[in-house]
């Protein structure tokens, strides 16, 4: 029976919270038309969930160094650009490396120059200015789901390890920068929100773990090989029936690990891009939407991040349904679109000027890309997700890569 907006109530229990999360996942997969009953209900549910989670898990004040690093990312600043605020290049390095504390003159200069509040730079929280907080709240990890997926073992008997001990061991075994101290960092990308931080971090750790387990399948990575032609070659693998498998093998050959790991409940995650501590680039895909058009765009978007944006300590977490003002997300979108369908070819094509299946097939053959990519482009531009839906390749990705070593479906 279809639920109405009047059936929706303020969340008061965790059971109700989980029920609404499951319904959000279901409604998102339907891709309802704007203004429809389903679309309106989805918006209301998201607002109620955000309100409940913000009250249950209030956002901690940012760490001062993380606030500086975030502003550097935001303004594309290098360490050398911070010398006027710190005095010398070595002081910049020492402060950002947490080896030297911020001084009062530094705080004043940063507050004025970078627009970071003095309270943030002093590490003051309004909730409790005197009480120190745990860096990690281990109780907020999705324990039940981790056990159900076989990531960690369930504690049984008196001699068993506690949940916190098991989680600490899981994190320490990965040994990546998302250990305890890194929970103070602000992840990059549109999928991140404070209420889903723990689920996203542990999902990333699992992706890293699986990438390391399959490290022998990787070739040597050479950053200089990444280019527009590289992404174009990757996109044209969609032309083949087993294109997604060929794409994974192509990237593996070039030293880029691709891991398929379904998203955890409550996270709106399509993909991620990061580098392991040894510099190995890793792409994580959730297949939240099991469609060929979504697979190819997400994959190319994450490769674009690795090409253009990823450093030693960044990780992009992407919800590609979300709008973003981040120039790096906009650039990754542009690169992915251009790799799939070059702008000049698109503007003159019949698929753009007179969308129909014949013109979609014609452009597909000209560009040597799967028709799903073109159909998806038309849907997004026209904001009509009902047209040409039979061309999107629904259900084809999971069935194709489910048994691949990098696919865990």
Image (spheres, rainbow, N blue to C red):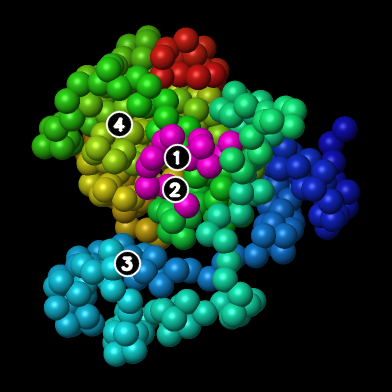
Write down the residue under mark 4: 340
Q: Main secondary structure of the magenta part?
A: helix
Percent x, y of residue 130 = 59, 80
Mark 1 or 4, nearer chain start: 1
Write down the residue under mark 1: 172
Mark 2 or 3, nearer chain start: 3
Can the viewer see residue 26 in this picture? no
Between residues 117 and 143, which one lies in front from this camera angle?
143
Mark nearer the viewer, 4 or 3: 3
Percent x, y of residue 399 = 51, 12
Mark 2 crowd level (few <14, some 14–19, many ≥20, 10 Å Cα) = some
Percent x, y of residue 263 = 55, 34
Between residues 34 and 43, which one lies in front from this camera angle?
43
Residue at the location (41% across, 19% down)? 406
Q: Is residue 169 magenta?
A: yes
Q: Magenta region: which residues?
A: 166-180
Mark 2 or 4, nearer chain start: 2
Residue at the location (31% across, 38% down)? 276
Give SS at disc 1. helix
């Amino acid at each position: 029976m279809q639920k109405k907006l009047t059936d929706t109530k303020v969340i008061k229990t965790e059971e109700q919270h989980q029920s609404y999360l499951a319904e959000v996942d279901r409604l998102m997969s339907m891709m309802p038309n704007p203004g429809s009953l389903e679309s309106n209900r989805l918006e209301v549910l998201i607002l109620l969930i955000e309100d409940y989670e913000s009250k249950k898990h209030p956002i901690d004040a940012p760490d001062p160094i993380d606030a500086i690093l975030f502003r550097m990312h935001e303004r594309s600043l290098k360490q050398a650009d911070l010398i006027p605020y710190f005095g010398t290049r070595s002081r910049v390095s020492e402060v950002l490396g947490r080896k030297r504390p911020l001084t009062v003159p530094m705080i004043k200069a940063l507050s004025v120059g970078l627009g970071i509040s003095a309270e943030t730079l002093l590490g003051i929280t309004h909730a409790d200015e005197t009480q120190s907080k745990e860096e990690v709240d281990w109780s907020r990890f999705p324990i039940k789901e981790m056990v159900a997926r076989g990531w960690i073992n369930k504690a049984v008997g008196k001699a068993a390890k506690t949940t916190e001990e098991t989680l600490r061991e899981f994190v320490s075994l990965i040994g990546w920068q998302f250990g305890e101290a890194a929970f103070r960092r602000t992840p990059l990308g549109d999928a991140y929100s404070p209420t889903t931080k723990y689920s996203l971090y542990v999902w990333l750790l699992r992706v890293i773990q699986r990438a390391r387990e399959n490290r022998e399948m990787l070739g040597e990575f050479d950053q200089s090989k990444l280019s527009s032609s590289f992404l174009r070659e990757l996109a044209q693998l969609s032309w083949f029936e087993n294109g997604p498998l060929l794409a994974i093998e192509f990237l593996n050959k070039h030293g880029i690990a691709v891991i398929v790991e379904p998203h955890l409940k409550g996270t709106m995650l399509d993909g991620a891009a990061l580098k392991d501590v040894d510099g190995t680039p890793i792409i994580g895909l959730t297949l939240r939407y099991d469609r060929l058009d979504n697979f190819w765009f997400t994959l190319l978007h994450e490769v674009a991040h690795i090409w253009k944006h990823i450093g030693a300590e960044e990780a992009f977490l992407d919800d590609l349904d979300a709008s973003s003002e981040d120039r790096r997300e906009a650039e990754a979108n542009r690169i992915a679109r251009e790799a799939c369908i070059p702008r000049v070819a698109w503007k003159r094509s019949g698929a753009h000027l007179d969308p129909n299946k014949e013109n979609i097939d014609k452009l597909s053959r000209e560009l040597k890309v799967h028709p799903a990519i073109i159909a998806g482009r038309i849907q997004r531009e026209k904001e009509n997700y009902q047209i040409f839906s039979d061309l999107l390749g629904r259900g084809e990705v999971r069935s194709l890569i489910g048994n691949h070593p990098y696919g865990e479906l």
